[in-house]
Amino acid sequence: KMLVDAMLELASKGVDGVHFDYIRYPDSEYCFCDGCRARFEKLSGAPVKNWPGDVRRDSKLRVLWRKFRCEAITAPVRAVAERLHAAKSRVEVSAALFRDPLSDPDYVGQDWASWCAKGYLDFACPMTYEDDFGWFKNKLDKEARQVPGNVPRYPGLGLGVWTRDGLQAMRFADQVRYVRETGLRGFTVFELGWKLEQLMPEVREALDRLCGAGQGRSRSGQDPRRAADAPRHAGTVP
């Protein structure tokens, strides 16, 4: 309730959008606290004798446990989206989405493919922070197959977590090139700060080498940091 109220209050302040960051569990071992146990037992209709072992081993309980965890993460996203969409608000709802739309419900309780299918998100920001181009390409291709196409996707370029090997500009440019080739409207950067500012001249040169002269700018001809077709959220780059 506190999270939902805070997001709705923020949305009322004239912002362009609200973004759910870290809207997931850390991993599959969360959360087995007394509160989660009580709520889960209420859902299942019976006490769990061996906690948490039974929800790991018992196939029926495990299915119910997956549903329980996903609902806990989905509930605030759904509540904020439904309230804003019902009010016909111009405030857009987005979220940072984890590694894999098929395994994320089990691993971190984030069923983000269903969020897209049900229209909870106005655009999606998958955390495709791979520094290896092959892995990055595979993730984008997998998302295209597994995530409904009704919601725009802006894949994340993980500049802030990449190996510092002197190849960041070429790596960045190569991933930008592939995003453009897939027809996606843009991308996001983790993180948008001094590293990107310093790399931009090298990125433009690398894009020109990869795509031809003049391609270091966006399709609209603007600086990549300011292109008009990007989401209105701060920190997003086309």
Image (tube, rainbow, N blue to C red):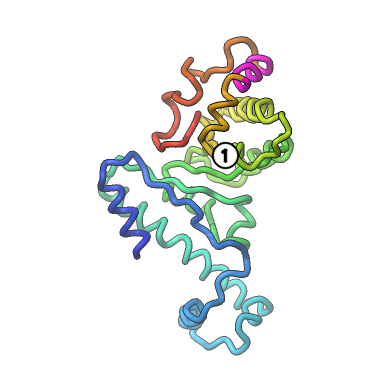
Residue 139 drawn in magenta: no
Percent x, y for residue 4? Answer: 35, 59
Residue closest to the eye, 193 or 49: 193
Residue 149 relative to residue 229: left or right: right
Q: Residue furthest top?
A: 213
- The image shows residue 214, relative to residue 226, as above or below, that is above
Q: Which residues are magenta?
A: 202-210
Drawn side of residue 137 relative to residue 26, left or right: right
Residue at 41% over, 24% down: 228
Tag 1: Cα neighbours inside 10 Å, few (<14), some, or many (≥20)? many
Say above or below: 43 vs 19: below
Q: Where residue 204 sits: x, y (%)?
A: 59, 18
Q: Quadrant of residue 107?
A: bottom right
The x and y percentages for residue 207 are 63, 19
Q: Amino acid at mark 1?
A: Gly
* Image-quadrant location for residue 176: top right
- Which residue is tagged 1? 156
Magenta stretch containing residue 208, yes or no? yes
Q: Which is the main secondary structure of the residues drawn in magenta?
A: helix
